[in-house]
Amino acid sequence: MASMNPFTDVLKVLENEYASVADEGTTADVVGFIDTGSYALNALYSGSIYGGMPANKINALAGEEATGKTFFLLGIVKNFLDKNSNAVSILFESEGSITKEILQSRGVDTKRVLIVPVETIQQFKTQALRVVENHLKTPEKDRKQLLLGLDSLGMLSTTKEMTDSESGKEVKDMTRTAEIRAAFRVLTLKLSKAKIPLIVTNHVYQTMGMFPTKEMGGGGGLKYAANNIIALSKSKNKDSEGNVTGIIIRCKNLKSRLTKENTESSVMLSYESGLDRYYGLVDLALEHGIFEKVSTKIRLPDGSTAFEKSIVNKPEKYFTEEILSKIDAAAKAEFSYGTAVDSGDLLEEMLNDED
């Protein structure tokens, strides 16, 4: 005999569409992951090289100009659409930089992407809310899987700022931070319920003072609402002759509800071949004893040796399923919260969120 739900009457009284018995899952649960195109970045997000960005949360990519924010956004859109044949993506765009040519260069199916130019925070909030509510009203069997993007939050104005500008007033809008908070307050629960990911790119700036630091624009609105915040910075990648062959993008986990904060991984963007899926795995394997450095070569688990350059140039040959499985376990130890040892860190994070 099936046990009765002790909350049936309470749920009727509450009339709260987000309420549920914890055993049946909650709106806070992560329902899946989106592949980022990089094993190392997947691990930073989820604790598994096979995971990636949470598929029903607000995810923030922050960085200075030309650090790869839009590049990563479009790469994740591509992977999302490739994995789900009935999926579509709606990109709210404030920079005027996402063209058909750029989407095609990243391999994105342009027939399944809607570009929505927005000028103000209020406009983004209203239109994004309409999209999500329309999705929730659609019968579940008829829903297409959906990914939303905003590129970028930092370029959005406010209605007041636009009005002041039109009338010739040069006054800073002190309501901007509050408007950003309001936008994400109304979207957060609805996105989780609808199982829709939102990827937001944002700029960082250098603070003034005796101890300058880099801060994300927009106040605390996105900081509080985002499930995770990854900060990007870059350096040049050069070959043995000193020629620049691409860029190495350093990814730092500023906030996460799934993995340890302040952990880092790096990804490599080659000018010739694009994002390197395997970059960073050699270092992870060496650090956790899966590979062993022997003179100028690397010893593999089967006892054979190879130069690091050979492994990097032919990763599919050397990173077998068995080795990737071991690296995945190492990634979990490196990035994930433990069940007991690191529970204090998790508690500290939850308390910080309440501040």
Image: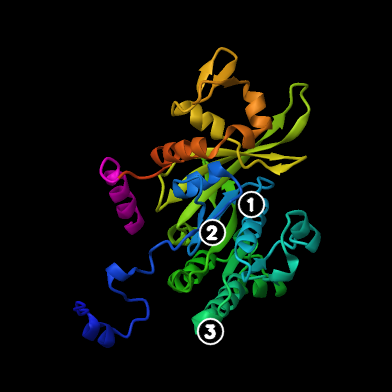
Residue 101 as seen in the image, left or right of residue 217? right
Q: Nearer the viewer, residue 138 or 329?
A: 329
- Mark-to-mark CA distance, 2 and 1: 21 Å
What residue lies at 63% left-to-right and 28% top-to-bottom? 311
Residue occupying the far right of the picture: 101
**Residue where numbered disc 3 is placed:** 138
- Which is more foreground, mark 1 or mark 3? 3
- Vertical placement of 203 versus 14: above or below? above
Is 77 displayed left or right of 97 in the figure?
Answer: left
Indicate left or right for 192 with 355 as reference: right
Q: Residue 181 location, x and y as percent? A: 47, 66
Amino acid marked by disc 1: Phe
Residue 189 spot, x, y in % from top left: 43, 71
Find residue 46 and report its horizontal and vertical position in percent: 46, 50
Q: Give SS at disc 2.
A: loop
Q: Amino acid at mark 2?
A: Gly
Reading the image, the residue beneath label 2 is 218
Sequence-first tag of 3 and 2: 3
Q: Quadrant of the C terminus?
A: bottom left
Give the residue pinned by disc 1.
Answer: 72
Please tell me which residue lies in front, 88 or 175. Answer: 88
Tell me which segment is drawn in magenta: 339-355
